[in-house]
Image (cartoon, helix red, strand yellow):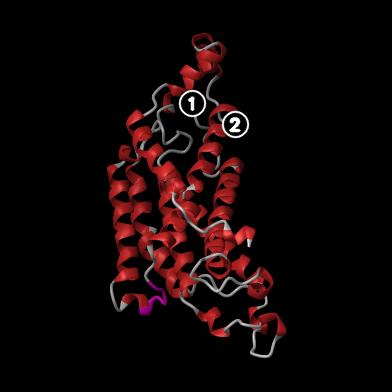
Amino acid sequence: MKQFIRYLISSNIGEVVCIFLTAALGMPEALIPVQLLWVNLVTDGFPATALGFNPPDLDIMSRPPRSPKEPLISGWLFCRYLIIGCYVGVATVGAAAWWFMGAQDGPKLSFHQLSHYLQCSEGHADFAGVQCSVFESPYPMTMALSVLVTIEMCNALNSLSENQSLLKMPPWSNPWLVGAICLSMALHFLILYVDPLPMIFQIRPLSWPQWVTVLKMSLPVILMDEALKFLARNYIEPGTEFEQEEEERQYHGLVGKIRRGLKGVSWAFVLISAPLLVWIYSLDSDITNIFWE
């Protein structure tokens, strides 16, 4: 139940941050209501339901008994939701901004032009050479929607366990979740590439370089949550004092700490994910153009 709530809260915080950020920056809408409804009612629904089949955490027997007065969502958990949700929102808005400012097939606008798009007119000096119709292009919304969907699928993987790393509880620990993520992504491809659905959702099919950018913007959410889980396991919710003393005796010194960290790692997952990540981030893309140009 907690992971189900965690997934939906952090995802919804991301959508709220996205809407607030576009309004605060004066940018065109990154997402429209029909797209948000699709994400909330369809693509998020399958992974959220599948989280109910999560296996128990590996360290569940080493934790102290849960107090009956303990709230379902602690202050630390809410902080985690907020951090992940903020990244979801920033990445979603960043994907739309990237198409306007950095994409090779985009208009290559400056941030000033993007944040003052309502002032665009043929005679305006700040928009010389810019066609104002570009601000109504469906591609920025397509990028934003694709990043939102992909990042929430990554967030579903984060929700496999409250504190355990994906290296020790790989995705296939819950095959229902893997199937739900595949189904949600298949539905997203459906509305992108099968007519007349792109027209209904006001989006367009993405090219391979654009998908590379989507992946590069989405995958860091896993690394962020892994760091937060590490803090929770080792400093915030470390387990019983007896368990800590036993582990210190068994794994003392630097070598012992390394052995402790590698204990229970799914090397199959490492061998699959590590080369895949290296390959994705080695692919040429113009994602950095938003910062340098």
* Structural crowding at the residue carrying mark 1, measured as other residues with C-alpha within 10 Å and reported as few (<14), some (14–19) or many (≥20): few
- The alpha-carbon separation of the residues under discs 1 and 2 comes to 12 Å
The numbered mark, 1 or 2, whose residue comes first in the sequence reads: 1
The stretch in magenta equals 199-204
**Could you say which quadrant of the image residue 276 lies in?**
top left
For the C terminus, the quadrant is bottom right
Name the mark on residue 257: none
Query: Disc 1 marks which amino acid?
Result: Arg
Q: Is residue 242 magenta?
A: no
Query: Which residue carries the number 1 mark?
Result: 63
Quarter of the image with the N terminus in it: top left
> What x and y, as percent, mark residue 266?
36, 29
Q: Residue type at mark 2? A: Ile
- The answer to whether residue 159 is visible is no
Res 236 label: 2
Tell me the quarter of the picture where residue 36 sits: bottom left
The answer to whether any part of residue 91 appears in the image is: yes
- Kindly indicate the quadrant of the structure image that contains residue 56: top left
Q: Main secondary structure of the magenta part?
A: loop
Q: Secondary structure at mark 1?
A: loop
Residue 58 percent across, percent down from the top left: 40, 28
For mark 2, give the secondary structure: helix
